[in-house]
Image (cartoon, rainbow, N blue to C red):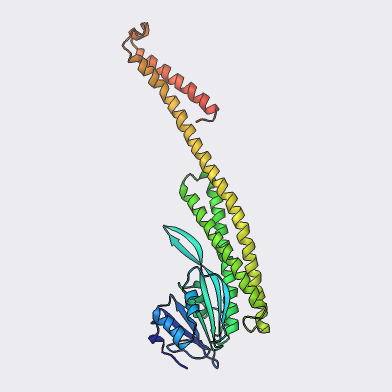
Amino acid sequence: MWYDKTTFGGVDMLRIYNTDVKTDSFDTLKKIKKGCWIDLVNPNQEDINFLTDSLDVDTSFISYLLDDEEQPRIDYDDENDIKMIIIDVPIREKKKNISRITTIPLAILVIKDSYIATVSLEEVPLLKDFKQQKVKEFYSYKKTRFIIQILYRTASLYLRYLRKLNREIEKAEEKMLKATSNRDLAHLLSVEKSLVYMTTSLKSNEVVLERILKGNVIDLYEEDNDLLEDAIIENKQGIEMANLYREILSSTADSFATIISNNLNTIMKFLAGITIVISIPTMVASFMGMNVPLGPIMEMPYAFLILLGISGVLSLVVAFILKKKNML
């Protein structure tokens, strides 16, 4: 059965890709056919109608697909022969000039064992590699292989982002000794928030991966088992790394706050010392301004220079004492 792509949601919302069984050539289609991959990003009402009317996707599934807080899980529609796998995939977003990593749900539908569809509320970066034919042994008609490749590359992407977050933590540690602004601390809080999202999503994805490994979700072939096991290993490694980095970050953030406070105290001590040194000439000058006799010193021709010298000597003595006490 064929359907015109342009009738359902337009080019930007619904894209159809297909690998030719005979030539293995990968092309973009305007109509769907058996073995194709249907990619929907932020589906509109026409796209939803396409799923429900043409592919018999249950309306309850649609509500899951449009929920940005949907948890990773597996669901079935035995009546219409549809299997749904939802996982969390990482993406990088930027808000108020602060970059962070968050996760969004990606739904994978196997429809009547003839079509595979991916549905997400935003463009998923890891799917671009499939669209640009950068993934080895990817064929749209090999649905089980395609699903496991998505799962494996998702786990690998988590590891890649975790390593980037670790580098950001290391850079923050290098800046720690001289940091005095709240921006550095805010950046660390953003990294911590990213780690929380990733830890939660990795643990949820682990449940989905374990269920698929049991063989009750999709038909697993021998050549796919190794890749699935690799995906599970990568996911477990991601969980361990995320937990480790969260502990390191928590310690780093505490140290960061302490150092910022110490740096502020050092500045306050310095300013207090400067105030004391400056106050000495001020006190001497105030004595000269009093409307009372100050003795014979005021009758001397160089009285001003003498008092200025005394003020300078006293200021230097006080500055020396404060320096010895690490207040300057």
Residue 93 location, x and y as percent? 46, 64
Residue 96 location, x and y as percent? 41, 57
Residue 80 drawn above or below residue 305 = below
Residue in the picture at 40% in, 78% down: 44
Residue in the picture at 50% in, 64% down: 102
| Any part of residue 132 in sight | no
Q: Nearer the viewer, residue 1 or 93?
A: 1
Residue 15 location, x and y as percent? 44, 82
| Any part of residue 267 in sight | yes
Quarter of the image where one finds residue 224? bottom right
Residue in the picture at 52% in, 79% down: 130
Q: Nearer the viewer, residue 324 or 251?
A: 251
Judge left or right: residue 94 versus residue 112: left
Residue 240 drawn above or below residue 178 = below
Residue in the picture at 37% in, 6% down: 295
How many marks overall? 0
Judge left or right: residue 328 versus residue 145: left
Q: Nearer the viewer, residue 214 or 320?
A: 214
Residue 63 location, x and y as percent? 47, 75
For the view shown, which residue lies furthest in the left direction?
291
Q: Nearer the viewer, residue 55 or 88?
A: 55
